[in-house]
Amino acid sequence: AQSVSQHNHHVILSEAASLELGCNYSYGGTVNLFWYVQYPGQHLQLLLKYFSGDPLVKGIKGFEAEFIKSKFSFNLRKPSVQWSDTAEYFCAVNQGGNTGKLIFGQGTTLQVKP
Amino acid sequence: EAQVTQNPRYLITVTGKKLTVTCSQNMNHEYMSWYRQDPGLGLRQIYYSMNVEVTDKGDVPEGYKVSRKEKRNFPLILESPSPNQTSLYFCASTWRNNSPLHFGNGTRLTVT
């Protein structure tokens, strides 16, 4: 069965530190990749997505992610985090085509200390 | 305003008492889906619907039912809730299944 794995469950950083959250998936075919963010008490919002083309995608709030097909990875990065980035981050993968199934990783809780 | 509306936001019930969580979207989206969110497990898909009268099981469908009689509505039905269905539930919709999802605000369900 397909799976999505986020390696870091809980990350604590100081403001201005750099961030990288790992995401690996198991499906070998064409995929669509997403990162969602959930601020405390809120619903999930899209940070960025990759469908095709340039494997380095930029999202909102200074986030970016790189799709490395050979490593089945889609890691999320931000050069300098802010306290307001404190949230839970989810990687999600959808098989290309009309399958209807979107699989989420377990989530990574990011805590940024002021 | 484009949105996905879930009701209720909070629900406390007892084992075996049937309940329905409603979900409605005003964006004319074809695809709708239900997820449950549990600590350490992320979001797991319960059911999804590609269009009216078209529904299919996700990864954790046991104990749940859905219906899609109209494009805008996708209610989640728990015929006989059990404590292991205590969770945070999210409804989501989008134009096509591989497009970014629009999420509702969530329904926190407690089954005692």
Image (cartoon, helix red, strand yellow):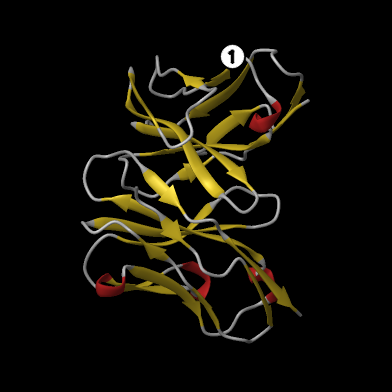
The answer to which quarter of the image holds residue A11 is bottom right
Residue at the spot of label 1: B79
Q: Is residue B72 left or right of residue B17?
A: left
Q: Nearer the viewer, residue A107 or B1?
A: A107
Q: Position of residue B58 (x, y in %)?
A: 41, 34
Q: Position of residue A30 (x, y in %)?
A: 21, 57
From this viewpoint, is residue A91 visible? yes
From this viewpoint, is residue B27 visible? no
At x 54%, y 22%, the residue is B63
What is the chain letter for disc 1?
Answer: B
Q: Residue reaching furthest front?
A: A1
Amino acid type at image mark 1:
Glu
The answer to which quarter of the image holds residue B50 is top left
Q: Position of residue A63 (x, y in %)?
A: 48, 73
**Vertical arrangement, residue B54 with respect to residue A80, above or below:** above
Q: Is residue B108 left or right of residue A56?
A: right
Q: Residues within 10 Å of mark 1 (few under 14, many from 20)?
A: some
Could you tell me which quadrant the C terminus of chain B lies in? top right
**Vertical arrangement, residue B102 with respect to residue B29, above or below:** below
* Secondary element at tag 1: loop
Q: Position of residue B48 (x, y in %)?
A: 40, 31
Q: How many marks?
A: 1
Q: Nearer the viewer, residue B74 or B1?
A: B74
Q: Is residue B36 left or right of residue A68?
A: right
